[in-house]
Image (tube, helix red, strand yellow):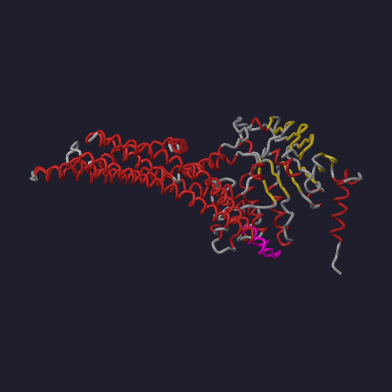
């Protein structure tokens, strides 16, 4: 139990930890105020037995009770506020910390890790930590402190009863360790099943269109139902494991009270304890049971809480790329790959590639699917680090740059565009958050999306759905180009930016890309002939190697992948429906 409490407090930020410590100190005061009922009861009982009930006795009892009641009210108010603030601030801070940490992880992490895992940790796990965990931990502490205070108080009345209460607490702690062990056996499965269910639900919702198109609802429902059933079974197993253990704890708590009561009566019958003390100890036996019972019930949750803390820390412990470089502004934007190799999961993706990309030139990268085209652009922008060789920008290794200063040089337009659930204006401002509305409109006009934006109900204040779900693919693409125009980076990477564009949007997107790429260094991955034939250089990639390189006319004189690529595109264009 102590290890779990230490783990939780270490998990908190220093400021929130200080609030919890203050709450613990207030808990001690709360226990002392609560224990003041014992001397109040003793004075009242003793006065009745001795027949000395008078105004002074009444005033003493009332004073103790008033101090006890008011003190507990005031202390509880401040203690609960501190606990609530610390709990929610801890979770909010951890969510932000995870977000910042994810920014600098290699992109390979996101290929390995399901969206459900990250979502489950940042939502369910941290929600439980901020609410249930905070309450459970503070109730365990409160119950433990109150029990100790009452037990210590018993020593002032009778050392023998004090010793019995301490032995009872020791027995309780032994069984409490068994309870924690029982819950620990199922805590991991409970949290893993929760993570799995969130992932399956997200996948089901995001792929609902494909599920309907291919009529695989029954298969998808089966997987979803299996995940829900696994979660149900895990929750039931957790309850089944906890209930008997908690029941044993409750029985022990009651037995401690019975033993204290029985011992007090025995001491009275043997003439070694006065009746007033006996009655007071009987009252204490109920109070110490109540406090122990409260602590015991919540300790069953500590292992689950501890596993949740571990899951958050597992994400935060994933090694980031070395991002603590210099804030560099390069003298030029020449890019050089020098014998670069890169492997992922023991599979070589890029194999000894050497390539020069001059500033303010256009380089088109073509090749079969899976040949390594996108990986090359990812290495240039340092989404991954090379395994061997070197990538330089302006003559400096990209690893010498701080990550943020490196990103200042790049804008990206991908085939799949993601827009945030926010206004269109703010989605465009994402490229430069401080931009004025006039600058937003100017960027939208250059990206050929101003007209369709003005046709929306709220214009630039229109809220787009998550991922841009309320807009067409061409509209999302143009807003992404407006975002890149707003950033105005000197290097533009276009990854299949026009691959899935319908003919109605192609003209506007082509014009938007022309406005975006004026006087820039362009690196494009494309399958369309007209987007690559005028490039300053065309690089053909196959199996992670450069197999051809040159201008369009030069490559058309060579037998190889590029000539076959062009011939295939020309043949496809010539197809007609009879």
Extreme-bottom residue of the structure: 578
Asked if residue 217 is among those painted magenta in the image, a careful observer would answer yes
Vertical comparison of 436 with 354: above or below: below
Residue 50 shows in the view: yes
Q: Nearer the viewer, residue 536 or 370?
A: 370
Q: Residue 506 at x, y = what percent? A: 73, 58
Q: Nearer the viewer, residue 169 or 43?
A: 169
Magenta-colored segment: predominant secondary structure: helix
| Residue at 52% in and 50% down | 123
| Residue at 18% in and 38% down | 271
Q: Residue 413 at x, y = what percent? A: 68, 48
Q: Is residue 57 left or right of residue 307?
A: left
Which image quarter is the C terminus in? bottom right
Q: Is residue 267 left or right of residue 565?
A: left
Question: What are the residue bounds of the magenta stretch?
Answer: 204-221
Q: Nearer the viewer, residue 529 or 116?
A: 116
Q: Residue 268 at x, y = what percent? A: 20, 40
Q: Nearer the viewer, residue 424 or 35?
A: 35
Q: Residue 215 at x, y = what percent? A: 69, 65
Residue 58 shows in the view: no
User: Quarter of the image holding residue 341?
Assistant: top right
Vertical comparison of 56 with 577: above or below: above
Vertical comparison of 102 with 505: above or below: above
């Amino acid at each position: 139990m102590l290890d779990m409490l230490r783990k939780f407090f270490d998990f908190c930020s220093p400021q929130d930890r200080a609030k919890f410590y203050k709450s613990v100190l207030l808990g001690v005061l709360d226990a002392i105020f609560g224990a003041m009922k014992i001397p109040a009861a003793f004075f009242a009982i003793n006065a009745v037995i001795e027949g000395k009930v008078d105004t002074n006795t009444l005033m003493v009892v009332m004073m103790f009770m008033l101090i006890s009641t008011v003190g507990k009210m005031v202390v509880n108010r401040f203690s609960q506020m501190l606990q609530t603030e610390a709990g929610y601030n801890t979770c909010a801070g951890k969510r932000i910390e995870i977000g910042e940490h994810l920014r600098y992880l290699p992109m390979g992490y996101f290929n390995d890790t399901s969206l459900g895992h990250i979502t489950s940790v940042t939502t369910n796990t941290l929600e439980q930590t901020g609410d249930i965990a905070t309450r459970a931990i503070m109730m365990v502490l409160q119950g433990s402190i109150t029990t100790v205070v009452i037990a210590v108080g018993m020593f002032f009345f009778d050392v023998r009863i004090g010793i019995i209460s301490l032995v009872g607490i020791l027995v309780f702690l032994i069984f409490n360790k068994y309870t924690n062990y029982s819950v620990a056996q199922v805590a991991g499965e409970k949290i893993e099943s929760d993570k799995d269910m969130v992932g399956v639900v997200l996948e089901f919702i995001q792929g609902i269109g494909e599920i309907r198109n291919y009529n695989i609802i029954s298969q998808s429902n089966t997987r979803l139902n299996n995940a829900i059933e696994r979660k149900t079974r895990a929750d039931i197993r957790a309850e089944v494991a906890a209930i008997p253990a908690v029941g044993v704890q409750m029985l022990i708590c009651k037995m401690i009270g019975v033993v204290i009561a029985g011992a007090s009566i025995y001491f009275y019958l043997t003439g070694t304890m006065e009746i007033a003390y006996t009655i007071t100890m009987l009252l204490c036996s109920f109070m110490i049971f109540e406090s122990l019972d409260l602590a015991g019930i919540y300790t069953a949750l500590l292992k689950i809480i501890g596993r949740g803390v571990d899951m958050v820390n597992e994400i935060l412990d994933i090694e980031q790329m070395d991002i603590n470089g210099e804030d560099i502004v390069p003298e030029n934007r020449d890019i050089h790959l020098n014998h670069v190799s890169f492997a992922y999961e023991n599979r070589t993706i890029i194999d000894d590639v050497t390539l020069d990309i001059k500033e303010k030139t256009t380089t088109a990268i073509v090749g079969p699917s899976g040949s390594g085209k996108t990986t090359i652009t990812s290495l240039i922008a340092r989404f991954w680090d090379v395994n061997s060789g070197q990538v330089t920008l302006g003559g400096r290794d990209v690893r010498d740059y701080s990550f943020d200063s490196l990103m200042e040089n790049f804008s990206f337009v991908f085939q799949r565009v993601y827009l945030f659930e926010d206004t269109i204006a703010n989605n465009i401002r994402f490229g430069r958050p401080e931009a004025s509305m006039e600058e937003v409109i100017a960027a939208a006009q250059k990206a050929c999306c101003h007209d369709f934006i003005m046709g929306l109900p709220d214009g630039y204040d229109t809220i787009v759905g998550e991922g841009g779900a309320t807009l067409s693919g061409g509209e999302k693409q143009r807003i992404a180009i407006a975002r890149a125009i707003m950033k105005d980076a000197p290097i533009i990477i276009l990854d299949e930016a026009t691959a899935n564009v319908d003919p109605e949007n192609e003209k506007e997107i082509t014009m938007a890309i022309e406005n975006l790429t004026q006087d820039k260094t362009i690196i494009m991955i494309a399958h369309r002939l007209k987007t690559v034939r005028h490039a300053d250089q065309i690089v053909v990639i196959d199996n992670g190697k450069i197999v051809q390189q040159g201008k369009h006319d030069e490559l058309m004189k060579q037998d190889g992948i590029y000539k076959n690529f062009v011939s295939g595109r020309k043949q496809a264009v010539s197809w007609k429906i009879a």
